[in-house]
Image (cartoon, rainbow, N blue to C red):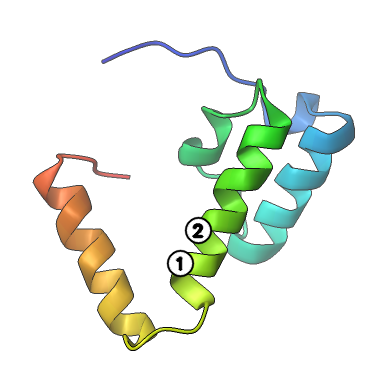
Amino acid sequence: MAWIQTVKPEDATGELKQEYDAAARRAGKVFNILRVQSLNAPTLHASVELYLATMHGPCGLSRAEREMIATVVSWANRCFY
């Protein structure tokens, strides 16, 4: 497993703190998938926006179908987070 430097939520400031606070409001915590992007807050923001558009934007798939696709792809890629 690779080691990636991250910023802990309690150490975040500025734009990163805003992103972490928004993540905590959405999910109750800051997941590691967000923390690995913590050294570049604009990239983290863009990644979150892409996720939100993909999972919540207009689409012919239900939310459950989208989650199932995400789960299967994660499983196939051995990403257990």
Please count the marks in the image. 2
For disc 1, the marked residue is 54
What's the residue type where badge 1 is placed? Thr
Q: Spatial distance from mark 1 to mark 2, Cα to Cα?
A: 5 Å
| Residue 42 visible in the picture | yes
In front: 67, or 30? 67
Q: Residue furthest left?
A: 76
Q: Nearer the viewer, residue 57 or 10?
A: 57
Q: Residue at x 51, y 44 (%)?
A: 31
The residue at the point 23 percent across, 40 percent down is: 79
Q: Which residue is mark 2?
A: 51
Looking at the rendered image, the quarter that the N terminus falls into is top left
Residue 14 appears left or right of 66: right
Q: Image point 45% across, 71% down: which residue?
A: 55
Q: Position of residue 65 (x, y in %)?
A: 26, 80
The amino acid marked with disc number 2 is Tyr
Question: Image check: 73 left or right of 27?
Answer: left
> Extreme right residue here?
14
Residue under the image location 66 percent in, 20 percent down: 39
| In-image side of 39 versus 71 (left or right) | right
Report if residue 30 is visible in the image.
Answer: no
**Residue 5 placed where, x, y %?**
55, 12
Horizontal and vertical percent for residue 3?
40, 10
Neighbor class of circle 2 (other Cα within 10 Å; few <14, some 14-19, many 20+) is few
Identify the image quadrant of residue 8. top right
Percent position (x, y) of residue 73?
Answer: 18, 54
Q: Secondary structure at mark 1?
A: helix
Return the mark for residue 22. none
Dot 1, how many residues are within 10 Å of its Cα: few (below 14), some (14-19), or many (20+)? few
Which quadrant holds the C terminus? top left
Q: Is residue 65 above or below residue 48?
A: below
Disc 1 + disc 2, Cβ < 8 Å: yes
